[in-house]
Image (spheres, rainbow, N blue to C red):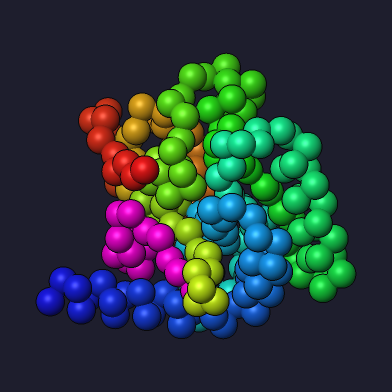
Amino acid sequence: MANNKNKNQEEVVLSILKKNQSLMKVLDYIDTLRIPDYYIAAGSIYQTIWNGLDHRDLNYGIKDIDVIYYNPNDLSVETDLKLYEKITEFVTKEQIPYTIDVSNEARMHIRKKELVGREIPPYKSSEDAISRFLATTHAIGLTKKDGHLFIYAPYGLEDILNKVARPIPCKDNLKHEYDAKVTSWQERFPDIQIVPWTEEKKCHTKK
């Protein structure tokens, strides 16, 4: 029964995502770049789903697309910049209303130390990174495998489909970051259900 429920939830999510033509165009283009272990993750995915559930413009509230990938053999900022420029050139040419953010999750522990002076354990893969995002609503990625759409959602899809913001209190996440994100969500999606921050340090991990 649980497997059938999960399958039905995935079908609902994919049916909504496929209707966002802008998102699908960007995904198809990124797939041609052969970026290792890539996903479009977090905001543009769950907000498309929420917009579909609310019968709104699928791009409502989406400011950017987060492109993540994992390449421990090249931690240079220059590689991120080149990918950013390629994808930005594509969305500009196609008149797609997104800005782009590109992150090699293999260097995210370095980036966080540079930006906020905080140490976090290195990620082991893009999926490991997704599992340690700020909230269960964030913890979703969309990619293509063998030409087919593939969703990675380590905490399942139920919170996203029910518009529940639930924190993932890994040791690399902080309460004030979650609270700031909650405020942003409530401005655009006032009916979202908020689960308060907890100090219990538990999160899913994946190699």
Q: Can residue 132 be seen in this view?
A: yes
Q: Quadrant of residue 89?
A: bottom right
List x then y, in percent, for residue 87: 76, 59
Q: Extreme left residue here?
A: 1
Q: In this view, does 43 lie above or below 27?
A: above
List x then y, in percent, for residue 140: 44, 57
In this rendering, position of residue 144 left or right of residue 152: right
- Whether residue 138 appears in magenta in the rendering, the answer is no
Q: Can residue 133 be seen in this view?
A: no
- Residue at the image position 71 percent from the left and 33 percent from the top: 76
Q: Give the range drawn in magenta.
A: 149-165
Q: Quadrant of the C terminus?
A: top left
- Residue at the image position 41 percent from the left and 44 percent from the top: 128
List x then y, in percent, for residue 22: 68, 74
Q: In which quarter of the image is residue 178?
A: top left
In this rendering, position of residue 114 left or right of residue 202: right
Q: In which quarter of the image is the N terminus?
A: bottom left
Q: In this view, does 100 lie above or below 142?
A: above
- 199 or 45, nearer to the observer: 45
List x then y, in percent, for residue 34: 65, 60
- Whether residue 163 appears in magenta in the rendering, the answer is yes
Q: Extreme front residue here?
A: 73
- Residue at the image position 28 percent from the left and 77 percent from the top: 7
In this rendering, position of residue 126 left or right of residue 202: right
Q: In this view, does 114 lie above or below 4?
A: above
Q: Extreme top residue here?
A: 117
- Residue at the image position 55 percent from the left and 40 percent from the top: 105
